[in-house]
Image (cartoon, helix red, strand yellow):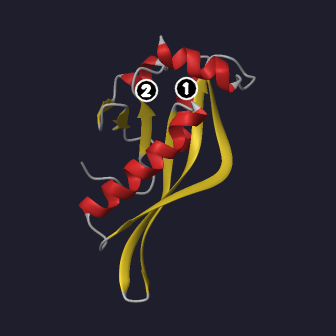
């Protein structure tokens, strides 16, 4: 599966709007890749039209893997980023940067993204409530 800037990773088992569930496919045991053609902004608009809220959390998170810019190294870095997201209980990650780096002769790939969260309420739920919703 090709991961690119703008890819949206959606948490497996999360309570989500029907428009989001219908166009995603399994990426790993805990995450799905949203495969719709919309940009994240258009996706947010369609989710709001269904009565849901899409929160964008501003902090940038990154993970790295040794190797050249290829599907394998990008996948490893993405899996590390996804593991960072699990304790937060946010149900979506938007990939915002994929870049090759080199330091001291070692090539590595960085994948960066922002946490997003879809829910019916307009007020962001606590981590405990988000975690409970993922367990249902």
Q: Residue furthest top?
A: 136
Q: Is residue 23 left or right of residue 42?
A: left
Which residue in the protein does label 2 denote?
A: 20
Q: Residue 113 at x, y = what percent? A: 53, 52
Q: Is residue 40 left or right of residue 5?
A: right
Rendered residue at 42%/40% (across/down): 9
Rendered residue at 43%/17% (across/down): 18
Does residue 39 appear in this view?
no
Q: Residue furthest right?
A: 123
Q: Residue 30 at x, y = what percent? A: 37, 31
Q: Residue 56 at x, y = what percent? A: 65, 41
Above or below, comparing residue 66 to residue 119 in the picture: below
Residue 128 image-quadrant placement: top right
Rendered residue at 33%/56% (across/down): 76
Residue 79's disc is none
Above or below, comparing residue 19 to residue 96 in the picture: above
Kind of element beneath mark 1: helix
Marks 1 and 2, Cα distance to the nearest angstrom?
8 Å
88, 117: nearer the viewer: 88
Assess disc 1: are there few (<14), some (14-19) or many (≥20) residues with their C-alpha within 10 Å of its C-alpha. Answer: many
Q: Is residue 89 left or right of residue 121?
A: left
130, 19: nearer the viewer: 130
Above or below, comparing residue 134 to residue 111 in the picture: above
Asked if marks 1 and 2 touch (Cβ < 8 Å), the reply is yes
Residue 68 image-quadrant placement: bottom left
Which residue in the protein does label 1 denote?
A: 47
Kind of element beneath mark 2: helix
């Amino acid at each position: 599966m090709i991961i690119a800037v703008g890819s949206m990773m959606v948490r497996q088992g999360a309570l989500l709007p029907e428009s989001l569930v219908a166009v995603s496919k399994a990426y790993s045991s805990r995450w799905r890749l949203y495969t719709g053609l919309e940009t994240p902004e258009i996706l947010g608009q369609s989710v709001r039209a269904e009565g849901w809220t899409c929160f964008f959390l501003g902090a940038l998170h990154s993970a790295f893997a040794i190797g050249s810019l290829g599907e394998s190294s990008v996948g490893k870095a993405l899996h590390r980023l996804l593991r960072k997201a699990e304790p937060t209980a946010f149900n979506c990650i938007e990939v915002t940067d994929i870049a090759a780096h080199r330091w001291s002769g070692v090539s590595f790939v960085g994948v960066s993204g922002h946490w997003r969260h879809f829910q019916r309420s307009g007020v962001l739920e606590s981590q405990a409530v988000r975690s409970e919703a993922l367990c249902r």
